[in-house]
Amino acid sequence: MENGAARPVIVAIDGPSGTGKSSTSKAVAAQLGLSYLDTGAQYRAITWWMVNNSIDLDDPTAVAAVAAKPEIVSGTDPAEPTITVDGTDVAAPIRTQEVTSKVSAVSAVPEVRARITELQRSLAASAEKGIVVEGRDIGTTVLPDADLKIFLTASPEARAARRSGELKGVDVHATREALIKRDAADSSRKTSPLAKADDAVEVDTTDLTLQQVIECVVTLVEEKRTAK
Ligand SMILES: Nc1ncnc2c1ncn2[C@@H]1O[C@H](COP(=O)(O)OP(=O)(O)O)[C@@H](O)[C@H]1O
Ligand SMILES: Nc1ccn([C@@H]2O[C@H](COP(=O)(O)OP(=O)(O)O)[C@@H](O)[C@H]2O)c(=O)n1
């Protein structure tokens, strides 16, 4: 490599809910000194704003009309990822059941996706050392030229158990049904659905520990860097 200076590396990590995208991406970015972007948090943030402003989420035209209004800012340090809407820290309120149940409807609106995709590309382009970006359409649509694309999967049972482990007192069966419903909505929308890119490496995490998944992805990034 010229002057020994590493070119920025772009890693796209996609997959359904509860497959380990956030935990894996954050740890890989921290270990390799890269930036980190949780694109789900951005869709949750715009959904939170729409709920707060009483926008009719059953009306895609109403959602599209205000898609450009909220200012969404993501902090990309993996040690302390942040998300604000019009200057307000929304890291906690974007994780409520209400936002979780409504985010798929908002994120299916093309004007919302265009707006958020532009933010994502600009953050990726300005990451000096590179970035790990996680979501649903990063490898297929947002960053189709990423150096490495990973598609994480896991059985619905494993994903539901992981999610209900996080939300104390929440029933595993209800969690499983809710995440299957959200995956179906995300996979069937017209604009950039949840999908594995043809050139993505699929990793089934059902029987792997989080540490094993992190090591697997770190090894794949290092292989790509050496080959660059
Ligand atoms: N391979 C794994 N084995 C067990 N638990 C895991 C694994 N990967 C992630 N988890 C846990 O599952 C939960 C969901 O992971 P998360 O990274 O938020 O998934 P996603 O971003 O894909 O929705 C977290 O509590 C996380 O610690
Ligand atoms: N790149 C992305 C990321 C998330 N999303 C939407 O945002 C929602 C929340 O994403 P998330 O990553 O926070 O979801 P979890 O898997 O963490 O529960 C998803 O269900 C999708 O509707 C999207 O459409 N495209």
Image: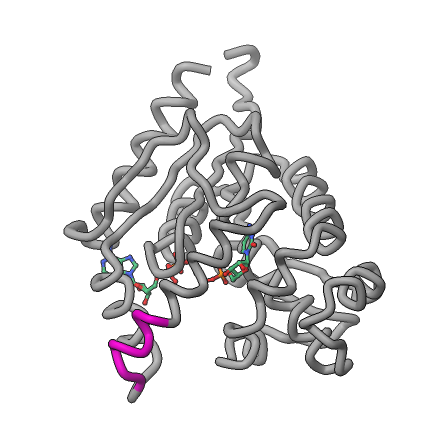
Q: Is residue 54 covered in magenta?
A: no
Tally the marks. Answer: 0
Q: Residue 204: where, in percent of width, then height? A: 24, 44
Task: Left or right? Give the position of 123 relative to 145.
Answer: right
Q: At x 40% / y 22%, what residue is drawn?
A: 224
- The residue at the far left in this view is 207
Q: Is residue 173 covered in magenta?
A: yes
Residue range highlighted in magenta: 170-177
Q: Residue 153: where, in percent of width, then height? A: 30, 48
- The residue at the far top in this view is 2
Give whichever of 57, 133 is nearer the camera: 57
Image position of 67 with respect to 124: above or below: below
Which of the 4 image quarters holds residue 45?
bottom right
Q: Residue 223: where, in percent of width, then height? A: 34, 23
Q: At x 39% / y 53%, what residue is drawn?
A: 16
- State whether the magenta stretch is mostly helix, strand or loop: helix
Q: At x 49% / y 58%, what residue is drawn?
A: 185
Give whichever of 211, 55 is nearer the camera: 55
Give whichever of 154, 24 is nearer the camera: 154
Image position of 102 with respect to 141: above or below: below
Which of the 4 image quarters holds residue 172?
bottom left
Q: Residue 98: where, in percent of width, then height? A: 54, 81
The chosen color scheme is one colour
- The residue at the far bottom in this view is 169
